[in-house]
Image (spheres, rainbow, N blue to C red):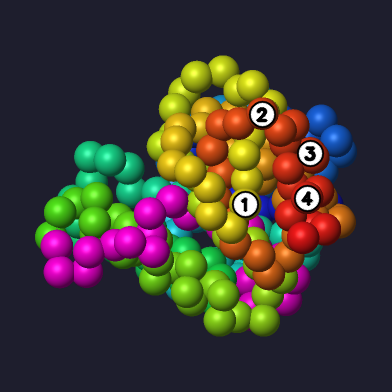
Amino acid sequence: MRIVVAGGHGKIARLLHPLLAARGDTSVGLVRHPAHVADLTSDGARGLLLDLETATVEEVAAALAGADAAVFAAGAGPGSDPARTLTVDRDGAVKLADSAVRAGVPRLVQVSSMGTDDVDRDSGDRFQVYLGAKADADAHLRGTDLAWTVVRPGRLTDEPGTGLVEAGPSVTRGAVPRADVAAVLAAVLADDAPARRQFEVVGGRTPVGEAVARLTAG
């Protein structure tokens, strides 16, 4: 498979690239800075220069041409102001989905967040703006004809991955290593993984492959 990852130099993406490369997939990371291309090469991926914030839908669609799937793993980051949170976490995700439709890419897997269904729309708090941006992006993706999957992890950590998670439409809130989220994304991108599904994921006791397989059967 050829998989294009928006936010290709992000923490989750850089953990995902080697997993895809190890099973023979081609991972292409969209990056804004030329210096990041070499980093992706070391991850077993190919870097493609494209700024998702400023690029047009036509330009993003051109970058997606020929892909079997796309992944939205971009994010403005915790230090960003609310305005940029909207342009990256909401508008960037919407643009990627629209571009995937235009390019004929069949699948899109989106990294979202737990708590988006409980967002306080009246709050100007940075985290509430972030949750609202994710909620809007998820709703837009669900409204497309893509074979979409929305993955909503709990609090992300940089702890080593355990390979064990709890995943389902709604799970008890908790933390999850980014490495395990990357493993979930890799499993979801497999041919028989769930499509047109949304689920939450935190650290747990079930092997990633088994947890994703249960979602497929459910």
As measured in the structure, the alpha-carbon distance from the residue carrying label 3 to the one carrying label 4 is 9 Å
Q: Amino acid at mark 4?
A: Arg
> How many neighbours does mark 4 have within 10 angstroms: few (below 14), some (14-19), or many (20 or more)?
some
Describe residue 199's horizontal placement relative to residue 218 as left or right: left
Q: Earlier in the sequence, mark 1 or mark 4?
A: 1
As measured in the structure, the alpha-carbon distance from the residue carrying label 1 to the one carrying label 3 is 13 Å
Q: Earlier in the sequence, mark 4 or mark 2?
A: 2
Rendered image: mark on residue 205: 2
Camera-near label (3 vs 2) is 2
Q: Which residue matches tag 1?
A: 168
- Look at the image and say whether residue 118 sits in the magenta stretch: yes
Q: Is residue 120 placed above or below 156 in the rendered structure?
A: below
Tag 1 secondary structure: strand
Name the residue at 79% across, 40% down.
210
Q: Are marks 3 and 4 in contact (CB under 8 Å)?
A: no
Name the residue at 63% across, 45% down.
167
Q: Which residue matches tag 3?
A: 209
Q: Are marks 1 and 3 in contact (CB under 8 Å)?
A: no
Q: Amino acid at mark 3?
A: Gly
Camera-near label (3 vs 4) is 4
As measured in the structure, the alpha-carbon distance from the residue carrying label 4 to the one carrying label 2 is 14 Å
Q: Indicate the position of residue 146 as horizontal and vertical percent values.
A: 68, 75
Q: Which residues are magenta?
A: 99-123
